[in-house]
Amino acid sequence: QSALTQPASVSGSPGQSITISCTGTSSDIGRYTYVSWYQQHPGKAPKLMISDVSNRPSGVSNRFSGSKSDNTASLTISGLQAEDEGDYYCSSYTTNSTLLFGGGTKLTVL
Amino acid sequence: EVQLWESGGGLVQPGDSLRLSCSVSGFTFSNYGISWVRQAPGKGLEWVAAMSGSGGFTFYADSVKGRFTISRDKSKNMVYLQMNSLRAEDTAVYYCAKDIRTLSCLDMWGQGTVVTVSS
């Protein structure tokens, strides 16, 4: 099963908003609300940022928000800060009873 | 405090076996699933295997099915990943992670253990 499709890179200036897309199929994102987003800094373990499409775990800034439409999920970061720079991954449950990750998006804060 | 700690990584030759361990604490083992996720050097995250909170169900990625086995010892709060017939493409950092259910959302991760398969 191929990875969910994410843009390889996105960038934005401090204070701006950016959106990262994550495109799947009717067998994963399109069928389930088990879509998550993770942030990873170099050499570190991933950190959960969004669960179940749009839920923000305790301790995650409200500048992070998630949504889903049809087969595409999105992560929006508003008020970009330097500390937001890193890699972002989406994931989804699939009809094959597996967990599928996106290929990852490198966020650069200019 | 929820904590997960992987161990057991190392350098092995193609065809060898290796068992990774994940020590967990701070949560009720039987209420949450556990997944293993790996990351090859310079690459993205790849889900490898999962076990349900009940321990009655296991799930595997096609790339490791038949070669890897996930198991646990509730008495020791340990989860294991037995890896057989290792290949060069299995080289990666291996993370264990706690799921809020099973195969849904990984809310806590260990720091990872490095597996290198090379002759």
Image: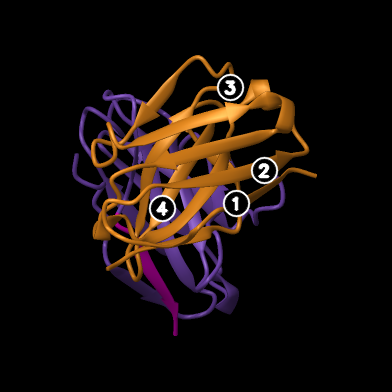
First in sequence, mark 2 or 4: give its number. 2
Q: Nearer the viewer, mark 3 or mark 2?
A: 2
The reply, left or right, for residue A98 in relation to residue B51 is left
Position of residue B22 measured from the top left corner of the image (x, y, whole percent): 60, 44
Q: Quadrant of residue A73?
A: top left
Say if the magenta span includes residue A104: yes
Q: CA distance from mark 3 to mark 2?
A: 15 Å
Residue type pointed to by label 2: Ser
Residue at the image point whose x is 26% and y is 33% from the top: A70
Residue at the spot of label 4: B38
Q: Which residues are magenta?
A: A103-110
At mark 3, the secondary structure is loop
First in sequence, mark 3 or 2: give its number. 2
The reply, left or right, for residue A48 in relation to residue B92 is right
Marks 2/1 in contact by CB < 8 Å: the verdict is yes
First in sequence, mark 4 or 3: give its number. 4
Count of labels in the image: 4
Marks 3/2 in contact by CB < 8 Å: the verdict is no
Q: Which mark is residue A52?
A: none
Residue at the spot of label 2: B23
Position of residue A59 measured from the top left corner of the image (x, y, whole percent): 71, 52
Residue at the image point whose x is 66% and y is 21% from the top: B30
Q: Using a 10 Å C-alpha cutoff, classify the residue at mark 4 as few (fewer than 14 neighbours), some (14 to 19) or many (20 or more).
A: many
Residue at the image point whose x is 44% and y is 85% from the top: A110
Chain coloured purple here: A
Residue type pointed to by label 4: Arg
At mark 1, the secondary structure is strand
- Chain holding disc 3: B
